[in-house]
């Protein structure tokens, strides 16, 4: 009996969702009955690749989606169905532009150095009315609504359902809060290895959207749904580990971080312009990055390629002696490509022993960087795409087949 067939028998699963993320980050799936799962677990479920954003044509052979049993997740709201992430193949070979494959290649690259990337994400989202046009709670009107207890508790039925679902899945969620914009929320769960985090991030977006609909709401992860309000970031927390533990920790280093951490940071800063094409992949992303001050008084998104200590006005924050926080990504970032591109940039920093330069502890919103060393983030998607096209090291790491495919998909909205 195969792994999935045994899982179905043990857990009473009637159907499996064989799922993958396309280049847009949209989840695609087929529903496989438990009676057929043993066969398809071996052969893979077939997809016409042209029908999803995978840079294929109608003349291409079927894409076969082979499930990764390690990702099995029972739908908390529909426990007779299990979701499973798949790895894509075509013609007996891995589909190199598949986002999960792109991440796996970077993880292998880190593994060759004896390193493992551990990450946590903070995907912010809005809860809107059923039509997706207005804040779902019309009484949520504070100018500074962050941590608003009453607004949080008015959505208690939904937020608590999400938290309890995550607890049941073993994700160890530890807090949920109302964020800086009216109608905006964030739920945090414990960090894990990068592939597990990416799988959970992909599932989280579907879970939140599904449960919100059941409460008569629409969830939006869009970077900037409302011009006057703070946008949806997706901050990424990063550390590299080996058998001895967290390699970013060094009590004798600046702020308790090791030279390895600062080299990784140097890679993030070096590749930031090209990185934006993946961490901030839509036209709407640049309304968030380049947005004017919001009604709350701050955008909470970076404008400059800079880093500081425990300072949320910079692209990278050093919150403690354990990790780096990249504040650049937004809600449109593909869960797998986000992890892959950031790891590729950081590993280049390590391999080249890049120096991130001095820390900037100023308020970058009121006292922005000046002089020859000051570098602004791309102001438009076109500028980010041009930077990505010219970033040879980043493209080589991610693979030219993926880069060509990613450069061809349309950005119209």
Image (spheres, rainbow, N blue to C red):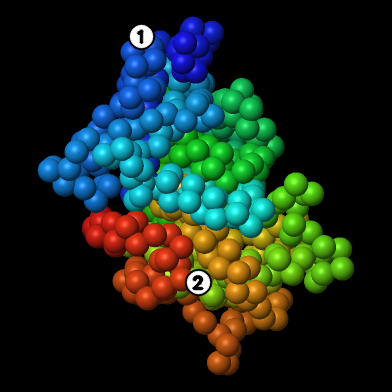
Tell me which residue sits at (30%, 27%) in the image. 45
Compute the Cα span from label 2 to label 1: 48 Å
Tell me which residue sits at (48%, 59%) in the image. 341
| In the displayed structure image, the side of residue 303 where residue 256 appears, left or right | right
Tell me which residue sits at (64%, 27%) in the image. 170
Q: Residue furthest bottom?
A: 371
> Can you see residue 138?
no
Q: Position of residue 327 (x, y in %)?
A: 57, 61
| In the displayed structure image, the side of residue 219 where residue 251 appears, left or right | right
| In the displayed structure image, the side of residue 268 where residue 412 appears, left or right | left
> Can you see residue 374?
yes
**Between 40 and 207, which is closer to the camera in this rendering?**
40
Tell me which residue sits at (30%, 33%) in the image. 64
Quarter of the image that includes the C terminus: bottom left
What secondary structure is marked by label 1?
helix
Above or below, comparing residue 130 to residue 319 in the picture: above
Which disc, if any, is residue 167? none
Quadrant housing residue 34: top left
Q: Position of residue 361 (x, y in %)?
A: 71, 76
Q: Position of residue 264 (x, y in %)?
A: 63, 66
Above or below, comparing residue 49 to residue 80 in the picture: below
**Between 33 and 383, which is closer to the camera in this rendering?**
33
| In the displayed structure image, the side of residue 41 where residue 53 appears, left or right | left
Q: Residues within 10 Å of mark 1 (few under 14, many from 20)?
A: few
Mark nearer the N terminus (2 vs 1): 1
Above or below, comparing residue 389 to residue 34 in the picture: below
Which disc, if any, is residue 271? 2
What secondary structure is marked by label 2?
loop
Which disc, if any, is residue 35? 1
């Amino acid at each position: 009996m195969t792994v999935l067939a045994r899982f179905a028998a043990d857990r009473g699963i009637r159907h499996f969702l064989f799922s993958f993320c396309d280049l847009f980050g949209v989840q695609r799936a087929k529903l496989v009955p438990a009676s057929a799962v043993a066969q398809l677990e071996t052969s893979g479920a077939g997809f016409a690749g042209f029908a999803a954003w995978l840079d294929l044509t109608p003349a291409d052979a079927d894409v076969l989606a082979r499930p990764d049993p390690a990702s099995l997740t029972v739908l908390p709201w529909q426990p007779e169905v299990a979701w499973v992430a798949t790895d894509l193949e075509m013609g007996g070979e891995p589909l190199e532009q598949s986002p999960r494959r792109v991440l796996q290649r970077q993880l292998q690259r880190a593994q060759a150095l004896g390193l493992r990337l551990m990450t946590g994400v903070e995907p912010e989202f809005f809860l809107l009315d059923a039509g997706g046009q207005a804040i779902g709670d019309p009484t949520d009107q504070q100018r500074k609504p962050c941590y608003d207890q009453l607004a949080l508790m008015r959505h208690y039925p939904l937020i608590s359902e999400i938290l309890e679902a995550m607890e049941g899945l073993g994700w160890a969620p530890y807090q949920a809060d109302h964020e800086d914009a009216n109608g905006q929320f964030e739920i945090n769960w414990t960090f894990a290895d990068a592939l597990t985090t990416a799988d959970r991030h992909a599932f989280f977006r579907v879970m939140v959207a599904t449960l919100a609909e059941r409460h008569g709401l629409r969830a939006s992860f869009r970077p900037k749904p409302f011009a006057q309000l703070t946008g949806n970031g997706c901050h990424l927390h990063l550390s590299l580990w080996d058998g001895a533990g967290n390699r970013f920790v060094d009590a004798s280093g600046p702020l308790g971080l090791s030279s390895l951490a600062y080299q990784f940071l140097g890679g993030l800063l070096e590749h930031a312009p090209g990185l934006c094409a993946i961490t901030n992949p839509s036209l709407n992303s640049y309304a968030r990055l380049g947005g004017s001050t919001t009604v709350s008084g701050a955008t909470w998104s970076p404008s400059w390629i800079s880093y500081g200590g425990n300072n949320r006005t910079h692209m990278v924050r050093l919150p403690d002696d354990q990790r780096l926080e990249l504040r650049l990504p937004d809600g449109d970032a593909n869960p797998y490509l986000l992890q892959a591109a950031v790891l590729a940039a950081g590993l280049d920093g390590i391999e080249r022993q890049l120096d991130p330069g001095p820390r900037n502890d100023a308020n970058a919103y009121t006292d922005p960087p000046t002089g020859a060393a000051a570098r602004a983030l791309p102001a438009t998607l076109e500028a980010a795409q041009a930077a990505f096209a010219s970033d040879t090291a980043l493209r080589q790491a991610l693979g030219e087949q993926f880069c060509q495919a990613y450069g061809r998909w349309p950005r119209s909205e």
